[in-house]
Image (tube, rainbow, N blue to C red):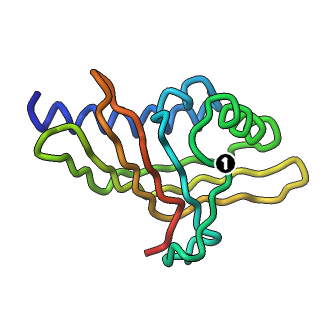
Amino acid sequence: MNEENTKQEIEEMVHRETRAWDTQDVELLMTIWHPDMVWPWPRTSQSLDPLDWVLEWGRYDYERWKQGWQKLFTTHTLVHNKREIKKIVISKEKDGAFAVVDIDTLWRDESGKDNHWKSRVCKVYTKVGAEWKCIMHTGVLEY
């Protein structure tokens, strides 16, 4: 497989995740994650130092993560979800990659309170057999 095909596969992963958020399709979202995924979150978008990060859900667990995302979809309305891929880096072995993505995703809960994910993330992918899975993801950070 050449680098251009690999780049297109990573772009597809980012776009699939975007579609899952846009449509609140929890089943589609669950196809993204690697079973060993752990997702650290900064307390704020200015928390560049990982000393200030937290783990909300622990290691990927299909049912726990599915319920968590479904709760978000049930209790919030998606106002907008804009995503722009800024960079894709692929390992020379074409078995690892990361995508830098600027996101602007605004959720609003039933009481009108906003949950705004706006800034930059890094999505790290690993090749598992014939498919890619997200194995690590930074929280939203303003660099």
Image quarter where the N terminus lies is top left
Query: Which picture quadrant has residue 77?
Result: top right
Does residue 1 lie above or below 124 as drawn?
Answer: above
Horizontal relation, residue 53 to residue 113: left or right: left
User: Who is closer to the viewer here, 136 or 90?
Assistant: 136
Q: Which residue is mark 1?
A: 57
The quadrant in which the C terminus is found is bottom left
Q: Position of residue 116 (x, y in %)?
A: 66, 60
Residue 81 on image: x %, y %: 56, 47
Q: What element does badge 1 sit on?
A: loop
Residue drawn at 47 percent across, 39 percent down: 36
In-front residue for pair 47/7: 47
Percent position (x, y) of residue 99? 33, 50
Q: Is residue 5 left or right of residue 98?
A: left
Going by the image, does 123 lie left or right of 58? left
Residue that appears at 36% across and 48% down: 124
Q: Residues within 10 Å of mark 1 (few under 14, many from 20)?
A: some
Count numbered badges in the picture: 1
Displayed quadrant of residue 15: top left
Residue at the spot x=63%, y=57% of the render? 55
Q: Amino acid at mark 1?
A: Trp
In front here: 124 or 102? 124
For image coordinates 69% across by 38% down, the residue present is: 69
Residue 30: percent from left, percent from top:
56, 29
